[in-house]
Amino acid sequence: MRRILILGGTAWLGREMAEAFIAQGGEVTCLARGESGAWAPGATFVRADRDTADGLGTVAAQRWDVVVDVSRQPGQVRRAVRELQGQAKFFVFISSANVYADQGTQGQDEDAALLPPLNGDVMESMESYGEAKVACEQAVLAGFGDARSLVVRAGLIGGPGDIFGRSGYWPLRFAHPSTPDNAVLVPAAPGLPASIIDVRDLAAWIVRASLAQLHGVFNATGDVATFDEHLAVARQAAGHTGPLVSAAPDWLHRHGVAEWAGGKSLPLWLDDPLWRGMNARSNGRAKSAGLTLRPLAETLLDTLAWEVATGIDKPRRAGLSAAEEAGLLAELRSTNSS
């Protein structure tokens, strides 16, 4: 039985990976503070704070077939590499497509230029997320070398359990419109790219690749569709037949509607030309190495079911509230009729 150490493992992707490793017969240990959620049934949980001097505790004295790290903090990753490189056969680092210096050009692969690495051990804010992940990648590759490491640059992750609310917003909004005529506000976004990777597909591939000791750097992203195509799939999943009310990007920006994520946003919409390539990176290398992707319709149907099961009125971390959307629709229609 292969021994797996996940540094993390209680949040969304980490838990999915733990469950997938266990399903493959792995003996899984998750080391975390335990503040992000419960660990997977069948896993061993070690409560620890990686920012303390003895943060890796007893796991650093044990032998591991695979170590998986999801951290964004360079100091944590450097310590893990330093203390585990003699104890682990293989190291997997979950990075991000945010590491690339150019996010505007579409279709780039893993050889595209990266941001400069973050100086120091601590990422103080999300403004330096990409630079922090670059520093983490460099620490892993320096300590374990190319042959003993796998770097996974994940794209936007979606699917059931998406606590960030990005992949669930559109199917849920189409299923539960905010106005009596069932209208839904959408951005005018012809031709803009959109891409999500189902968390279950990502976790399953990481596990298969880890156990096979697939080494190298891979973009693990979903296939690219247009934003309008994504909306059409979400609308069909929800059975929506009401009107779509399209708003121009400049109108949305003037009314305080953000792109991509966060409060008062239209999730997944990336109008900024400097960021459009974020949704359109090449995943050819990963697919050639066994990454398989389920249809987008399945992801959005399952995400809608999860959203409904966990409460359609729960606080959201992305999107427009029903009141916000209804207000914007009323103002847009008033403007168009005047």
Image: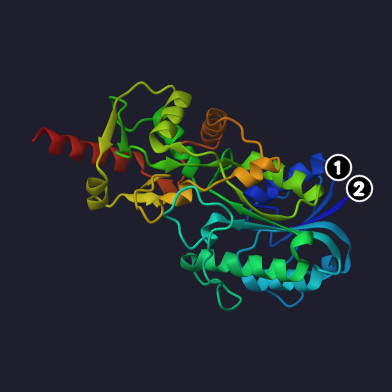
Q: In this rendering, is residue 229 above or below 314?
A: above
Tell me where residue 207 appears, x and y as whole percent: 75, 46
**What crowding class fits label 2: few (fewer than 14 Cα within 10 Å), some (14-19), or many (20 or more)?**
few
Identify the amino acid type marked 2.
Met
What colouring does the structure picture have?
rainbow
Residues 96 and 183: in front is 96
Q: In this rendering, is residue 47 above or below 18?
A: below
* Direction front: furthest residue: 111
The first of marks 1 and 2 along the sequence is: 2
Residue drawn at 70 percent across, 75 percent down:
52
- The circle on residue 1 is 2
Identify the amino acid type marked 1.
Gly
Residues 327 and 257: in front is 257
- The circle on residue 328 is none
Visible residue check, residue 104: yes
Q: Quadrant of residue 47?
A: bottom right
User: Do the numbered discs 1 and 2 sit on residues whose CB atoms are within 8 Å?
Assistant: yes
- Mark 1 lies on residue: 25
Left or right: residue 117 compared with residue 65? left
Q: In this rendering, is residue 49 above or below 44?
A: below
